């Protein structure tokens, strides 16, 4: 099977594009509006960009009428957003926060989770989440689509503060991923959970390997 997604009719019922680049880490992002309303929403177009300094990005499709997502508006308005790690235990709260609430609704309350104070960012963190990044907004790049909902706002930010709960750190100083069980998006309505981890070291090692391992 092959086809040109720009012009050919799709040969299968469900879009393969949405389930090939997987698993996708979830950007469970919290922001606060200029009116003081806390917002919380998951984005599956989320990724680290570089580590010196640590930078991240997320991409948010617009609504069918072209309206931008509250997360984008709040990040631009306040200069901050917070990434909260989405885990197996928090999966139902993540799913509830995916609903398209109006901007006057406190989505922490709707998701049924607890707020924790930030140090630098003006908004809140998900207290139950084991890891957080407080992210300082840098810029937004808008990419137009074939329809309003196809348009996407790509937001770039620098990680200004990292929070990790002590009880998820192993004796050798690494984050205990199998214990945390992060969840990831698989496309469609499908998700997966990280329970098994294996190691592969690059032959030859050296400075580049140290960077990949997280020693630099």
Image (cartoon, rainbow, N blue to C red):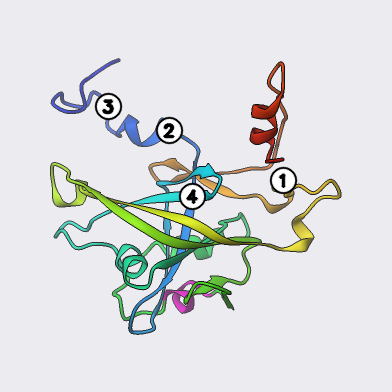
Task: Please identify the dominant SS of the magenta region.
Answer: helix
Between disc 2 and disc 3, the foreground one is: 2
Q: Work out whether mark 3 precedes mark 1 in sequence or the reverse, and give the earlier one.
A: 3
Q: Work out whether mark 4 precedes mark 3 in sequence or the reverse, and give the earlier one.
A: 3
Quarter containing the N terminus: top left
Residue 86 visible, this orientation: yes
Q: Which residue is mark 3?
A: 12
Between disc 4 and disc 3, the foreground one is: 4
Residue 116, image x, y percentages: 59, 76
Pointers 4 and 2 in contact (C-beta within 8 Å): no
Q: Work out whether mark 2 precedes mark 3 in sequence or the reverse, and give the earlier one.
A: 3
Q: Is residue 134 left or right of residue 162?
A: left
* Numbered tag placed on residue 55 in the rendering: 4
Pointers 4 and 3 in contact (C-beta within 8 Å): no
Residue 170, image x, y percentages: 81, 50
SS of the residue under disc 3: loop
Quadrant assignment, res 80: bottom left
Q: Is residue 147 left or right of residue 128?
A: left
Q: Which residue is mark 1?
A: 178
- Chain part drawn in magenta: 107-112
Q: Work out whether mark 4 precedes mark 1 in sequence or the reverse, and give the earlier one.
A: 4
Between disc 3 and disc 1, the foreground one is: 1
Between disc 4 and disc 2, the foreground one is: 4
Q: Which residue is mark 2?
A: 21
Per the model, the C-alpha gap separating discs 1 and 2 is 22 Å
Using the image as rendered, state which of residue 187 and residue 129 is in the foreground: 129
Q: Is residue 116 left or right of residue 41?
A: right
Q: Residues within 10 Å of mark 1 (few under 14, many from 20)?
A: few
- Residue at the (33%, 80%) spot, across then down: 34
Quarter containing the C terminus: top right
């Amino acid at each position: 099977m092959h086809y040109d997604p720009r012009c050919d009719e799709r040969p299968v019922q469900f879009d393969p594009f949405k389930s090939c680049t997987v698993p996708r880490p979830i950007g469970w992002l919290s922001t606060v509006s200029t009116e003081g309303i806390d917002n919380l929403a998951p984005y599956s177009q989320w990724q680290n960009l570089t580590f010196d300094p640590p930078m991240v990005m997320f991409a948010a499709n617009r609504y069918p009428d072209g309206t931008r997502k509250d997360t984008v508006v709040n990040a631009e308005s306040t200069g901050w957003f917070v990434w909260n790690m989405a885990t197996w235990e928090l999966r139902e709260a993540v799913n509830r926060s995916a609903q398209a609430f109006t901007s006057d609704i406190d989505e922490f309350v709707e998701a049924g989770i607890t707020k924790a104070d930030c140090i630098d960012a003006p908004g809140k963190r998900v207290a139950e989440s084991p890891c957080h990044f407080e992210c300082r907004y840098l810029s937004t790049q808008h990419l137009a689509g074939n329809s309003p909902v196809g348009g996407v706002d790509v937001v770039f930010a620098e990680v200004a503060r990292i929070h990790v709960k002590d009880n998820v750190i192993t004796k050798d100083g690494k984050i205990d991923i199998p214990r945390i069980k992060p969840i990831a998006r698989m496309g469609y309505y499908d998700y997966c959970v990280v329970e098994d981890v294996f190691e592969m070291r690059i032959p030859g090692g050296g400075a580049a390997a140290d960077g990949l391992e997280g020693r630099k």
